[in-house]
Amino acid sequence: MLHVGRGCPKSRNMKRSILIHPDPRLKKMCLPVADISDDRRALANDMLETMYAAPGIGLAAPQIGVLERLIVLDCAKSDADTAAPLVMFNPEVLAFSDEKGVYEEGCLSIPDQYAEVERPSEVRVGWLDRDGVPREQEFDGLWATCVQHEIDHLDGKLFIDYLKPLRRQMITRKMQKLKRERARE
Ligand code: NI
């Protein structure tokens, strides 16, 4: 059957490719999202799809080369139908606890490298949801670490920036090697 003059079929979620460190786009200050349009909601859906497929518990827009203040996260246990995706436009840490916590962090842009990072163990975060409605919530545990890690991405900051220079350089060299290997494939 021929479809004439119907235009494109409705676009479906699309997995995007994730930038690997070092990449100048991962070091940029991202711009606020001015208008939460269908376009931006579709981007958030693509990011969730990309994050779940990786698999990961958080993803920031610059990691797929979009330099805008948008993150997605889901730290719910992935072994059941307990998906709890959060989409945050223009997220901001509004307050944080004096108490610190240490988690072993990783990053989809720095595959297979993990290191302990100390951060405030509780944070209050404000953001706009996918309908542009302002939200505010407190996070603790893994969620607190994850949301701070993702917001850092929007300021061009990676978890390895918290490590001692030698360790950071060692990881960066491994990533350069990984990128050379992938480019040859
Ligand atoms: Ni990351």
Image (cartoon, grey):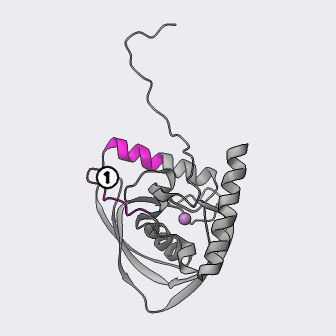
118 in relation to 28, above or below: below
Q: Is residue 148 left or right of residue 68?
A: right
The amino acid type of the residue labelled 1 equals Asp
Task: Give how far across and how far down residue 98 sits, in percent.
Answer: 44, 92
Q: Residue furthest left?
A: 34
163 in relation to 10, above or below: below
Q: Is residue 101 left or right of residue 134?
A: right
Residue numbers of the magenta segment: 28-45
Can residue 79 be seen from the camera position used here? no
Give the residue at x 70% y 58%.
Answer: 177
In the depicted view, which residue is nearer to us: 33 or 178?
178
Give the residue at x 55% y 48%.
Answer: 49
Where is ligand 1, by quadrant? Answer: bottom right
Quarter of the rendering containing residue 104: bottom right
Q: Quadrant of the C terminus?
A: top right
Task: Give how far across and how far down residue 101 sits, in percent.
Answer: 55, 86
Residue 91 colored magenta? Answer: no
Q: Is residue 177 left or right of residue 66?
A: right
Quarter of the rendering containing residue 22: bottom right
Q: How many marks?
A: 1
Give the residue at x 48% y 7%.
Answer: 2
Q: Residue furthest top?
A: 1
Where does label 1 land, which residue?
A: 131
Can residue 152 be seen from the camera position used here? yes
Label 1 crowd (10 A; few <14 / some 14-19 / many >=20): few
